[in-house]
Image (spheres, helix red, strand yellow):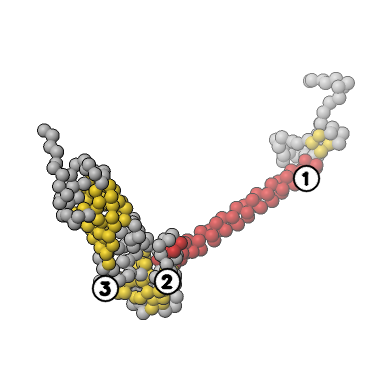
Amino acid sequence: VVVKMIPDNRLPPRHLHAVRTGKTFATIKWESPYDSPDQDMLYAVAVKDLVRKTDKIYKVKSRNSTVEYTIKKLEPGGKYHVIVQLGNMSKESSMKINTVPLSAPDALKIITENDHILLFWKSLALKESNFNESRGYEIHMFDSLMNITAYLGNTTENFFKVSNLKMGHNYSFSVQARCLYGGQMCGEPATLLYDELGTGNDPSATKSGQATDVAAIVVPVLFLLLVTLGIGFVVLYMRHRRLQSSFTAFANSHYSSRLGSAIFSSGDDLGDEDDEAPMITGFSDDVPMVIA
């Protein structure tokens, strides 16, 4: 069965939905009120800013059954109500769109001072072209022990001082692009946990202290091992030199210049009474050996 719709300009656009949403734009898509329009159709796209309470109307002309349109110049983190209808003010199709908020600041870290802490982060303008430093940042703190979230203030700098923290409390700090128009256009928050107030150190300082403690143990042990090895090598070398000197002196004392070699006894005749008897060192080739 094939069904063809009767053209009716009083019908609303069909299947209105968002295709892509960015920080400053939104691409929407819809279908004509009826299939295969035989002429150009003029649509009115009304964009209502729910935060600023402003309206904008765009005109779109197309003969296609499927129409795609990109709404530009939106604000990051904004909320919008989009209405699409034919130019003759027929029935309308509507939807709500939330644009992507600004990114969270990078490299949020804590530095502990004597009676306060300092929050540091990278400038959001380094990666967000839509962010102006004059907008600034706002800082929030959550106390997990008291289950309370507090707004600490805002700043246009890349650091913030926090004082009057209580010992033994665990805090979470968040930094984000400052909210606009009653806190409805905010950036994504960068959050950091600070739970070392019991010892007076922040997490990064604790890790550094632990690394320092390990180094303080390992370095002396390695030094002692090196010293022990060095002393062992020196002792072995001295013993080797002493044995070499003793052997050299012993060999020189038994050296025969006539034979050109050293003569050693087997040790069997040690302790005999005739120790002073001359030792027969050898026989000449021209003297006959007589065996009794």
Residue found at the far left of this picture: 1
Label 3: how many Cα within 10 Å (few below 14, some 14–19, many 20+): few
Q: Is residue 89 visible?
A: yes
Say which residue appears at 84% left-offset and 32% top-offset: 259
The amino acid type, in three-letter code, at marker 1 is Ala
Task: Decide which of tag 1 and tag 2 comes sooner along the chain.
Answer: 2
Q: Which residue is mark 2?
A: 134
Quadrant of the image occupied by residue 85 = bottom left
Position of 251 relative to 231 (above/below)? above
Say which residue appears at 28% left-offset and 62% top-offset: 56
Label 1 to label 2: alpha-carbon separation: 92 Å
Q: Which residue is mark 1?
A: 249
Q: Nearer the viewer, residue 174 or 215?
A: 174
Secondary element under disc 1, as helix, strand or loop, is: helix
Residue 289, position as x, y percentages in the image: 83, 21
Task: Decide which of tag 3 and tag 1 comes sooner along the chain.
Answer: 3
Label 3 to label 1: alpha-carbon separation: 90 Å
Left or right: 126, with 17 as reference point: right
Secondary element under disc 2, as helix, strand or loop, is: loop
Q: Nearer the viewer, residue 126 or 9?
A: 9
Say which residue appears at 22% left-offset and 57% top-offset: 83
